Image (tube, helix red, strand yellow):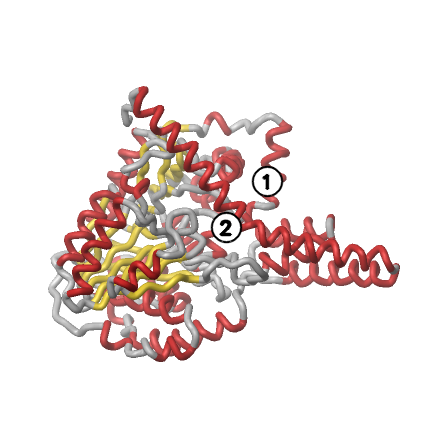
Amino acid sequence: MWPLDSDHHSQQTLEGEEKTRNGIKRMLFALASILVEAGFVFVQVFRLEEYSLPITIILRIAAFVLVLVIYSKNVTASMKMPWIILILLLPVFGTTLYIMVGINRGTKKMRDRFKEIDAKLFPLLPDDAEVRDKLAAVDPAAAGIASYLRNYSGFPLWQNTDVTYYDDASAGLEAQLAELRKAEKFIFMEYHAIEDKRSWRRIEEILAKKAKEGVEVRVFYDDMGSIGFITTDFVKKLESKKIRCRVFNPFSPGLNLFLNNRDHRKITVIDGKVGFTGGYNLADEYFNLTHPFGMWKDTGIRLEGDAVMPLTIMFLEMWNAGKEKRQREEDMYFEDYLPDYEYHASQTGFIQPYADNPMDHEQVGEEVYISMVNKAEKYCYFVSPYLILTDEMTHALSLAAKRGVDVRIITPGIPDKKLVYSVTRSFYHALVVNGVKVYEWTPGFCHCKMSVADDKMATCGTINLDYRSLYHHFENGCWMYDKDIAVQIRSDFEQMFAESRDVSEQYRDGDDAILRISQLILRLFAELL
């Protein structure tokens, strides 16, 4: 357990209160225009509805047709039913809200941008049939996951790559700083959230020095993810230091059908030879320099060798798709960032970095997690800061536990968002009654997103076990088949279990009726949380 003295606890409380206020401001700022616009449309349409019976009938018919369209969609019922219930109860408001935030395929303009960029980038990735055949000879079930990822995410399976696992985000940051200092040609950094404080400024100092030496430096961040951390002058500051900087999907008042889709990826690439990814953003709390929610647990990995290439591809995709055609054409020389060099890895395992895109019709992140559970024979462990599951994921976890697999999930002991935490806990009962064990990490907030099975397969990346990550965000992860890395990750899980409380029995009988009803109502809006 992590000792917390009274002074430290008081500091935590003050930081937590400030963080809570900041989180509320960010949430209100992000949702205000949506609610105002939805309210305005609702009022205008409602006036029309009162004005004429035929208009009322037309609106009701339109809502019913929309319900049929939603029902016919090839997505999980967990995503469809809340919208159907809302639209049937409040046809005008439900329809308005669905049009504004429920349509999850981005705008046509944005889809066309990604299609254009991907048509140039993905052919640069090599064929991996020979590597997958090698894995199939070792483990056919694991090779099936690799084939799925190749066929539906577009990213191949690799060998000749050394992977280093960091069980603490601070260790990952120090390793990144060391590699950034060695950069000779280019540095790419893409993060959901950047906080212009102590940790970032250590990075920025190196980036500015490297840019001055002639290294090409690009920084890319999500506007909504960083809204409470940096000011609008951040881009200008970096550009003044010859650091190229772009913002993904900038927030602005007004109708934005793409607002619900955020860039949640965390990627650093140095010279196309070394890459980093994992759960942590570039903000002080991730490295325990501040403690808004007790101790912070996060993890990451370092890649060196052939499998860095897909991380470079992912960065170039997002960097270019977010800009107009003229600006994209300026950065279309992709081959310059995909070096052909000899590397001799000391590790013999397999690794497959992959990305998930909310604009296609494939939930890659969720399918990989479900596949991990389905293939597990002895155990399968997960850790996620949020637990808002689809029926399919719940069924897979429960079925594995029923057939004797040791299935465990770790969630935070101290939440960063109390409303989401309440929804997270509402999923415990359906899992534990079927034999899944649920743990809460008592030292504070665990933000890592990982899974491991049978000392063979593991994942590490940005993908949470919630609707937002699995269905709405741009995400990335690494699937690994490597005994050494899997054992390291399993050992870290064992340490987390020792620091956690097992709440399985507590939730086996369910909560009192009133609390259960309130949680079920919250679940109706889980997709928006």
In the rendered structure, the answer to whether residue 93 lies left or right of residue 103 reads: right
Residue at 61 percent across and 38 percent down: it is 520
Figure quadrant of residue 397: top left
Can residue 158 be seen in this snapshot? no
Q: Which residue is mark 1?
A: 522
Q: Which residue is mark 2?
A: 467
335 or 331: nearer the viewer: 331
Residue type, mark 2 in image: Tyr
Q: Earlier in the sequence, mark 2 or mark 1?
A: 2
518 or 169: nearer the viewer: 169
Query: In the displayed image of the protein, which residue is found farthest to the right?
Result: 53
Can residue 54 be seen in this snapshot? yes
Q: Residues within 10 Å of mark 1 (few under 14, many from 20)?
A: some
Residue at 64 percent across and 56 percent down: it is 37
* 52 in relation to 394, above or below: below
165 or 36: nearer the viewer: 36
Q: Residues within 10 Å of mark 2 (few under 14, many from 20)?
A: many
Q: Check residue 402 in the rendering and tell me which mark sits there, or answer none.
A: none
In the rendered structure, the answer to whether residue 35 lies left or right of residue 117 reads: right
In the rendered structure, the answer to whether residue 492 lies left or right of residue 28 reads: left
Residue at 35 percent across and 38 percent down: it is 446
Figure quadrant of residue 157: bottom left
Report the label total: 2
- Mark 1 lies on a secondary structure that is helix
Q: Position of residue 331 (x, y in %)?
A: 32, 76
- Mark 2 lies on a secondary structure that is helix
